[in-house]
Amino acid sequence: MTQPQKPAKIILKDGSTFTGIFFGQPKAVAGEVVFNTGMVGYPETLTDPSYRGQILVLTYPLIGNYGVPGKAKEDGLLKYFESDEIHIQGLIVADYSANYSHWNAKKSLGEWLQEHDIPGVTGIDTRELTKKLREQGTMLGKIVYGRHNIEFIDPNKKNLAAEVSVQQPVLYKKGRRRIILIDCGTKNNIIRSFLRRNISVLRVPWDYDFTREKADGIVISNGPGDPKMCQKTIRNVRKALKGNTPILGICLGAQILALAARANTYKLKYGHRGQNQPCLEVGTKRCYITSQNHGYAVDSRSIPRGWREWFVNNNDQTNEGIIHTTKPFYGAQFHPEASPGPDDTEFIFDAFVKAVNM
Amino acid sequence: MKKVLVLGSGAIKIGQAGEFDYSGSQAIKALKEEGIKTVLVNPNIATIQTSDYLADEVYFLPIDVHHVTKIIKKEKPDGVLLSFGGQTALNVGIDLDKKGILKRHGVKVLGTPVKTIMDTEDRDLFVRKLREIKLKAPTSKVATSVEQAAKIADQIGYPVMCRIAFALGGLGSGVAYNQQELTDLVKKGFSHAKQILIEEYLEGWKELEYEVVRDQDDNCIVVCSMENIDPMGVHTGESVVVAPVQTLTATENFRLRALAIKTIRHLGVIGECNIQFAFDPRSDDYRIIEVNARLSRSSALASKATGYPLAFIAAKLVLGKNLTELENSITKVTSACFEPALDYIVLKFPRWDLKKFRKVSDSLGSEMKSVGEVMAIGRNFEEVLQKAIRMLDTGMVGLVGNQKKFRNLSEAVAKPTERRLFAIAQAIRRGYSLDKIYQLAKIDRWFLGKIKNIVEVEREVKKHRLQNLPKPLLKEAKRRGFSDVQIGALTGSVETKVRQKRKRMGIVPVVKQIDTLAAEYPAKTNYLYLTYDGSGNDLDSRAGKQIIVLGGGPYRIGSSVEFDWCCVNSIMTLEKLGYNTIMINCNPETVSTDYDICDKLFFEELSLERVLDICDQEKPQGVIVAMGGQTPNNLALPLHKAGIKIKGTTPGNIDRAENRHTFSGLLDKLGIDQPEWKELTSLKAAENFANNIGYPVLIRPSYVLSGAAMSVALNKEELKKYLKKASAINKEYPVVISKYIIKAKEIDIDAVAEKGELVCYAISEHVENAGVHSGDATLVLPPQRTYLATMRQIKKIARQIAAALQITGPFNIQFIAKDNSVKVIECNLRASRSFPFISKVFKLNFIDLATKVIMGKTVPAIEKSSFALDYVGVKAPQFSFTRLKGSDPVQNVEMTSTGEVACLGDDFQEAFLKSLQAVGFKMPQKTILLSTGPVESKADFLPSVRKLAEMGFEFYATKGTADFLKTHGLKAKVLYWPLENKEPSTLSYIADGKIDLVINIPKNEQREELDNDYLIRRKAVDFDVPLITNMQLAKRLVEAMSEKSTQELEVKSWREYE
């Protein structure tokens, strides 16, 4: 109450408005409004490139508690973040904690947002806002500052993967075996997951024709937006499907893999974003708790011959993964690399690496 | 699996409370749903789980190997559930398994195997299991010499904690930061102990808990994470706890989750369990403290915190179900195989009643002392903290605004007591930096920062008068959990004015649902809370035929699971009558806060403000205040004045019974006798009055501030001493003095009336003479030793009072009977503690009847007299003195028991012996220590001693008693009094296990002997030797023992008593 408060207004496409207080950088932004139900992990979530173009609502009300860590690097990657920048357009929370406490924190969430020129809004009934998104589906929205109004922007009309992908190939050297990571907006932890298993990673741009490169495995990363925007990637992957090199698609990557196999994808009403999505491994009694962040999904009815459903969401029965019946091709709609989230499905990396090492 | 035996947890005691009624009830529901027959053993008659509509057979019998074996032989169950009845059930289960009884009778342990239970219960085995998978437990080793201690300390690394084995109250324990300090410490230690435990020092580490569920197909989920605000060193049951974890990063949180799952898989738990971690606040180092391979207090809390029905799901899993087959009972469409996402924060605050006990220390540590807890739900920390503090119902208005003084503030911040958080607020007010407070208290700075926010809002609000309090500030104060009372006090106004103002400004709370998925899917249930941190309601309230039942709040001494039984039964009757039911309660250990019990559950404060808020929202037809004990009863008049319809007896009449003056006047008018009493406002007047009526006198201080205990004064000196100690005596805080009648019987009547006409009643007599609080007394139903004429008088008086106060609903009157004259000592126009007992003994649900008449439904007259039973019910108190180090284990006018049991028998002796064993009384085999008080009581007890001698018991006695026995031809070996410091002494005999039973009848007069007696009693409790301190109880015990042995006690189910 000591600092002057800057009022913020959130306007959704359906006309509903919410008023709160700015933290971070007070400024107007527009994007697609989505909610995430994870209770921890804002430094990881905000730097996840899959959130490109989105205004993120965190349903857990108390945010900022443990501050934000420093920029320590490991293997050329920021140790505590999922990419080098904050990708969300804006952050909406209920009760921001400027007072943070953690031995590893270097600054507050507000300071960090400000540094990256991203607005945060606190004092919002995020549950009420989330219910709107649940009932009416993901909506366009904007955060308004002062009297300056801005237009709604639909980020899905852009090729977001192209925006967040690396421009040039980057090699992360570890062991003799090497995978190619098609970067449609990869999280650092996908790279770390291979480096930890002594696999070198060649990270290539989303539209890079990797088919000419020698690879022990191909990984199609997660990323933002509509998978159908990544036509070049789909075409390249389709070529790879003719061979036998192991392929793993994660999240957007899994959708691209499905499209390459000539399955179809569609937009979910409000997506899966959180750390508690149960995924049943088809044909088993095993269910895994997964970290997710996707607005699009593979249509399970469109899965072509030679492929089968690998995982199914145990809440809404949507597809959560596909697998080739004979070749080492895997697509996981969730995030086996977690970060933030449970590590239940890390075994997918183990299985894939095994295939890579064969 | 056709028939399953479920072991309950018995009486409520410190460390094992109502949470097991919740878990057992859920388990039985889950089994029934699968078509499995259930047999329940639980002598806790006040529980919901022992209702006639749940288990197929209920045994009100002791949960011990002897009785459970007999039940197994009789019922021949296929399986047994050990993990739903707390430590009691687990221990008995392990014993049954060890003795081969389960195997012999083909009873399968469902869920977590006994081997796993043992691995978690035995410290060494547990550490070994963790080592197998390379996980860390705190290191500790026993040293028997200074050199060895130094060696161990070197291995562990400094600082180390040195614990002196068997030191009372941690005496002599300490932290050593280097070898010099260690040498000093252990040298001192070895002067009075043979062993010293050298332990890794984890003080200041965070303490975290995770609730883990696992099925037989190895699906494993973590349902809830919890963080103790108090760091390591304070028992989690004594800690303020929040869920979910607040101060860990995602990496840390998911790492602990992974460790939890790894541990649980390795141990092989099936069902539900709890794992506790210590976590270094300066790095990512951790220790696994323990695993509870059963439902626990924490799992009950986690269930209520998340809406995930842990006990219900666990019961399904132990039957072999797969997690993915089970549905989320809140959304009804999503899976039970998920981890709840909360969009709120919950905070648990323990409730202590330490002032009720004599000589007990107020410091909190590794031993649990709290008797209950509350849980607050909200959308920010400040809100839940302040709500929880009010929910405790100890008169506090929130974190700030209480009249609390701290003599040594730094110490009050550093030392864990129930006052510490308030001291921290005060320290912030005084300008202590958060760093300084952290150094003292080791409570994470994040929590301290939130406390600071509350103090800052207080400071801002205080600058204004209510009239000019700006709207944004008022709104912020409400958002940060300030009540109208608090704001009124800060702005020179009162609650009602604040309420008017804020409602005029449109500042009202919103209703939110708990849905387990943070709004991702709509909830089908109405598990609700109110918050000011929000703009939208989750419910469109509809004013239908809604009735609110107010719950009992936190369990505490005097108000426990019995009121929860009343509330739940009332709700069930209302539902049958076609009403939509609303429950308001804030106690996570209850069944009434299960969201499947009622149409709408508000997990909320039982305060005037909050109940009115809910009434504003829900527009109920009325509120029932008669079921939840005194807490809701106290709200009757204020709610009525605020325009809320109170169902049943009118608030005016409730008040006439509550108000000592009007009630006394009424008794006089009706010609009903009562002990002489007077309200006094000066020491002189008190002395004069006591002189007039004659000693002994009973003194009741004003409860408003002091919370001081009632007491008995035998003479003028004691009266003066007491009144000086009980702080103020003046016009504002008068003292009530009444004649203390000795050697009289005490009798209770529990009844239901309709428009002043008695519908049904039950008269029970106390075994103990008047002077033992009715809550600590042993109750007998129907009475065995009360004159018929007395019974007639009691019934007549009950009729008169019912008519005079136009009672509609439940009520209870307590009487003192001496010779044939009867005096009324108390009257409550609400359900009393004994309603479940009388209802279950009679097999006539008094609450069902009461609820019907309250709702204006006439019930047919019940022709059931107290004498028609062919069996007897005996209700016995459960004490928790073992847990309360130093407390004097003696019954007096203040209630000190924490729970109760009741057993049935074909006669009094049988029911009595069963009930004693059900509260853990071990029948003596050979030796009894007697110190039987003043001469007249020695004489009184003489025939009993003769009987014991005939039965072959050997006696030990203190000098006076031994001499007395000798003159009457009875032999007793003389032992020295504790303070004589000579061998053979009473204390060493007790400690060495040479005594099976201590009968110690205290005499009050002499200070010296009081200390001696106290030391004997305390020793008995500390060494788990049965102790009797009441003459009537001792006599009845001897009688019963001479007539029946434990082997002869019948194993009959509740149904079989007809």
Image: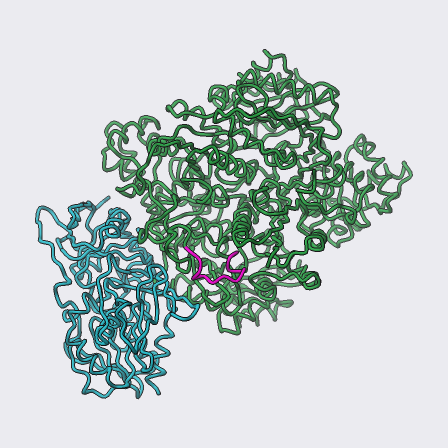
Query: Toward the viewer: B844 or B444?
Result: B844
Quarter of the image containing the N terminus of chain B?
bottom right
Query: Toward the viewer: B944 or B492?
Result: B944
In the picture, residue B874 is in which quadrant? top right
Residue shown at 57% from the left, 54% from the top: B36
Is residue B249 in view from this perspective? no
Residue B996, x across and y down, in percent: 77, 49
Describe residue B320's horizontal placement relative to residue B933 as left or right: left
Query: Toward the viewer: B610 or A316?
Result: A316
Residue B723, x across and y down, in percent: 58, 26
Can residue B177 be found in the magenta stretch? no
Describe residue B30's horizontal placement relative to residue B493 as left or right: right
Residue shown at 31% from the left, 54% from the top: B520
Magenta-highlighted residues: B315-327
Describe residue A107's horizontal placement relative to residue B253 as left or right: left
What colour is chain A?
A: cyan
Query: Which color mode does the image show?
Result: by chain
Q: Which chain is green?
A: B
In the picture, residue B248 is in which quadrant? bottom left
Quarter of the image containing the C terminus of chain B?
top right
Residue shown at 40% from the left, 40% from the top: B600
Residue B534, x across and y down, in percent: 28, 43
Query: Toward the viewer: A222 or B995?
Result: A222
Is residue B73 in view from this perspective? yes
Q: Is residue B1027 above or below residue B856?
A: below
